[in-house]
Image (cartoon, grey):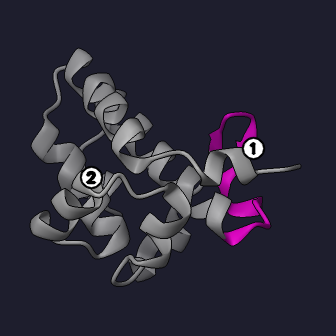
Amino acid sequence: MDNTRVFKMSFAGVYPLYVQKAEKKGRTKEEVDQIICWLTGYDEKGLAQQIEKKTDLRTFFEQAPALNPNASKITGVICGYRVEEIEDKLMQKIRYMDKLIDELAKGKAMEKILRQ
């Protein structure tokens, strides 16, 4: 599968959709930020800078300080694929983020989302 188009998508374009999805279900922007920071290692300032720079998803993950060591505990299906079986590591990280936001929107407790 050619994932080039997805990798070139702007994180600043995807981010508001994550926030909107969460807020529709009664969750907050702060929770979305907490999840993304947990996964990528960005702090609030770093996250804001990536949004401001309109960084593409490839660069967003390449510049991420550190993928959370518990990210491998994220399992399940997103967009018809099992996240733990996705071979392309960049696509897997993007789908991890999608999966965590889905869990937030479905009302899952933050402790479970953050694999604590």
State whether residue 97 is above or below residue 18.
below
Reading the image, the residue beneath label 2 is 51
> The C terminus appears in which quarter of the rendering?
bottom left
Q: What distance separates the C-alpha of mark 1 from that of mark 2?
A: 27 Å
Residue drawn at point x = 40 percent, y = 49 percent: 11
SS for callout 2: helix
Number of numbered labels in the structure image: 2
Reading the image, the residue beneath label 1 is 81
From the viewer's perspective, is 2 left or right of 42?
A: right
SS for callout 1: strand
Q: Nearer the viewer, residue 43 or 63?
A: 63
Residue drawn at point x = 29 percent, y = 32 percent: 16
Question: Mark 2 or mark 1, which is nearer the start of the sequence?
Answer: 2
Looking at the rendering, the stretch of residues picked out in magenta corresponds to 77-89
From the viewer's perspective, is 100 left or right of 24?
A: right
Q: Residue furthest top?
A: 24
Residue drawn at point x = 10 percent, y = 67 percent: 45
Q: Nearer the viewer, residue 98 or 51?
A: 51
From the viewer's perspective, is 44 left or right of 80?
A: left
x and y, in percent, of residue 22 in the image? 27, 28
> Crowding at label 2, few (<14), some or many (≥20) Cα neighbours within 10 Å?
some
x and y, in percent, of residue 7 in the image? 62, 54
x and y, in percent, of residue 42 in the image? 25, 72
> Crowding at label 1, few (<14), some or many (≥20) Cα neighbours within 10 Å?
few
Question: Of the residues tagged 1 and 2, which is closer to the observer?
Answer: 2
Residue type of the residue flagged with mark 1: Tyr
Q: Nearer the viewer, residue 24 or 1?
A: 1
From the viewer's perspective, is 98 left or right of 78?
A: left
x and y, in percent, of residue 103 in the image? 40, 39
